[in-house]
Image (tube, grey):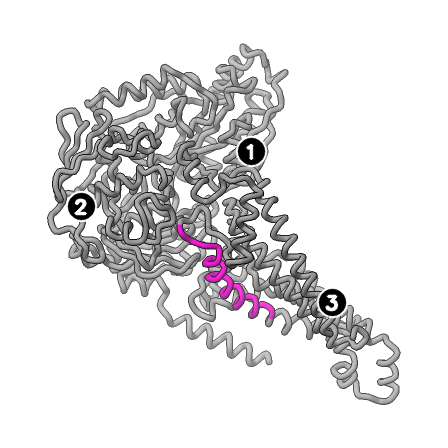
Amino acid sequence: MFRLITIAAASLCLLSCQKETQVEKATREGILLLGNSADPKSFDPQVVSGVLESNINRALFEGVVQFHQKEDLAAPMGVALELTPDETAAVWTVKLKPGLKWSDGHPLTAEDFAFTYERILTPELAASYAGMLYFLEGAEAFNMGETTDFSTVGFELIDSLNFRFNLRGPTPFFPELLKHFTWYPVPKHKVLEYGTIGMRGNAWSKPENLVSNGPFRIKSFRRSDHIEVERNPHYWDAANVSLNGIRFLPISNIFTEARMFRDGQLHITSGAAPEVVDLMERENPAVLRQEPYLGVQLYRFNTTREPFDDERVRHALSMAIDREALCKSVFRGYTEAYGMTPPIGKYDPPHEVSFNPEAARKLMEEAGYPGGKGFPRKKLLIASRETASTLATAVQAMWREHLGVEVEIENREWTAYLEATRALEFDIVAGGWIGDYTDPLTFLEMWTPTSSYNNTGWESQAYADKIEESFKITDPAERFEVLRDAEKIFLDAMPATPLAWVGKNYLIDPAVKGWDPLILDNHPYTKVELIPQETSR
Amino acid sequence: MLKLFSSRFLQGLLTLFVLVTLTFFLVRLMPGSPYTAEKAVPEHILKELKASSGLDQPSLVQYGLYLRNLVFRGDMGPLIKKDGVSVYEVISDSFPVSLVLGLASMGIALMIGIPAGVIAAVKKNSPADFASLAFAMIGICLPSFVIGPLLAVGAGLHLHSLNVAGWSSPTDWILPAITLGLPTAAYLARLSRGGMLDVLSQDYIRTARAKGVPGRKIITRHALKGGLIPAVAFIGPAFAAMISGSFVIETIFQIPGMGQHFVNAATDREFFLIQGLVLFYGFLIVAANLMADLALVALNPRLR
């Protein structure tokens, strides 16, 4: 019996030792193996909202403009031949490339775009990200159901190759918005073949029916196992696409993902836990990447509850947080936040957030809590995901040490935590925000009184006015000045305190070329190449 | 026999009905809804979303509709967050995977657990007995989220003999099947040891010995049948649990099985999926218990 087992084990070892790894095989075949955390909620770019869906959509669809391989703020033309603004940057005209086709060979025309934007704004479709299109004149009213006449929306069909966007005001960063998947076209002929314009659960986006216009089309899908896309021969630039396909793997356990990478089953991981970062720094630093990512980690105060209704208390708690220590010992690859919005291009947020325990103590004293005496025992609400609980423990200790304030950490299951945040049923709550597009507005619009993402109870008309004012300015520098003023109003009131700007940690195989640091982490797959390496991992 | 079968069958149906009803109302008591999201959905869109899945109706109306669809159409409902996917699709995609893994694990558990228990009982207080008990203790105490990664790192990364995770070839079954089978093997070892010890001290075994029946024959012919009764009673529900998947094993080894949906459906508030999975699992348990009952009747003449 023992001998039999030994022989079986030895032959198994022999069999697999000689075999090339999955990554080596895929590199040879030109297939990128990509960790992508979970199954997509849908393949329809108009009903999804997440990062993992956007990774898949970017392979399958292409909008007016594309992402650039290296530049965060460059917008190379996608299906458009030209995208031209008028002098106010409020009207943008698109001329499509001639001869565009869907992956089934059907021609793609400006009518598809007209249909696309009418569909995403149709109230019955209930597209959760329809708000991205509110930059179009009249789009909000149409989406709210105030009118059913799509001609009231700022989209103008000129002919089968040309159309025009009429925006609600000057939008010099409009090309950045157009990169977002909510602006990708959907095939009118297919959507209507399987249902109506506002129908949810329309079967056109089932993998077996899906027709797309991007560099790739869907090849196979197995739930919780993989999604594979292959070259789309009808793509306008198919000749310049190097990859033969991409395999998205929905690996939810970040440690399993790291093991699979080390075992040669993945080219790129979706992330890397702090423990894995430390290990790879020692073991194989060449495969570890740490890059800035357009996101912020923050703590919200409930300004409708005592004692957080007192601005001084909020500032004191914010000033007692040593962000440098957090970035060093809790996070990996994050940077200390000195404002809410991470620096984007020429936008630098006001330097209003700092670590100053002395001043924090003084403010606490002024607020009536000298040395933390009399400060009610409050709760810090978190959902135990990733580093949330280490972070909370560290901040809890800082408040105790510098202010004598004792907070209790309350851990809730994810959805219950989200629900409590939304309903303002918390004292202090952990949160975060990932930008949708590379403009400070994506971080600032959420703090207006009407935003469904505010969740602090803080309402400032002055702030809302500043944001509104920014919608009327064409000059980018002047616009940033106004947005910076708005951010200053926010930071002076401090309804939420930023902790750190997010860094993205991940592992990447040396065979992958053309995967450069991008702040939105939206890499154009058309520029990715796989070059076999001499030495393997 | 038929009477026993039909009464158990009716009890099973009643159990399932209670289960469906309880689950239906309990999931709706959880805080939040399927539409609770990190980036909150605006109010007017939320209204449309709820209307599209029928969640805007009163609970009792929803319950009536659910039962009607379930009983008359066999329709377990759609996924709320995943556009155009049905509960039936999710279960029919993932159950075969879990079934294969469960069968392999059960095979391992039976091959290790029962011989270990029987040997331990026959050689009571010998080193073999202590080894078997120690193995059982370790198997029960060490959770699979420790054993799984240890096996993956050991066999996958250091020996390079197997994939650390994935589900593309039959060799990928080995590590998860061992991880899932070990605790059950450990329980089986303890149960069959206890059962065998009981039986071996019975009068009829002593009689057999006195009549000069050889040791091996006493065990296989006379003792085993009665000694395995506790183990058989345990195997039924354990088998149902194994073939319905394990969240931990599936996330550690990246397996497209059914276990992950139990946990994700609950955190995502996928009402219909939770109900469907609970009903399906309930059905498996009821069926497995029924089988175990029948097997016990076959093993124990006094029950006939």
Residue annotated with mark 2 = A79
| Chain that bears disc 1 | A
Residue annotated with mark 3 = B191
Q: Which element is circle 3 on?
A: helix
State how far apart marks 1 and 2 are (Cα).
49 Å
Percent across and percent down for residue B42 are: 41, 32
Point out the stretch of residues depicted in magenta.
Answer: B84-106
Percent across and percent down for residue A504 are: 38, 41
The residue type indicated by label 2 comes to Val
Q: Is residue A90 left or right of residue A258?
A: left
Residue nearer the viewer, B159 or A379: A379
Mark sitting earlier along the chain (1/2) = 2
State how far apart marks 2 and 3 are (Cα).
68 Å
The N terminus of chain B: image quadrant: bottom right
Mark 1 surroundings within 10 Å by alpha-carbon count, few (fewer than 14), some (14 through 19), many (20 or more): some
The C terminus of chain B: image quadrant: bottom right
Q: In this view, does B275 lie to the left or right of A281?
A: right
Nearer the camera: disc 1 or disc 2: 2
- Which residue shows up at 25% across the image and 60% down it? A244
- Which residue shows up at 64% across the image and 72% down it? B110
Q: Which element is circle 1 on?
A: helix
- Which residue shows up at 33% across the image and 29% down it? A146
Residue annotated with mark 1 = A393
| Chain that bears disc 3 | B
Q: Which mark is residue A470?
A: none
Q: In this view, does B99 lie to the left or right of A115?
A: right
Q: Which element is circle 2 on?
A: loop
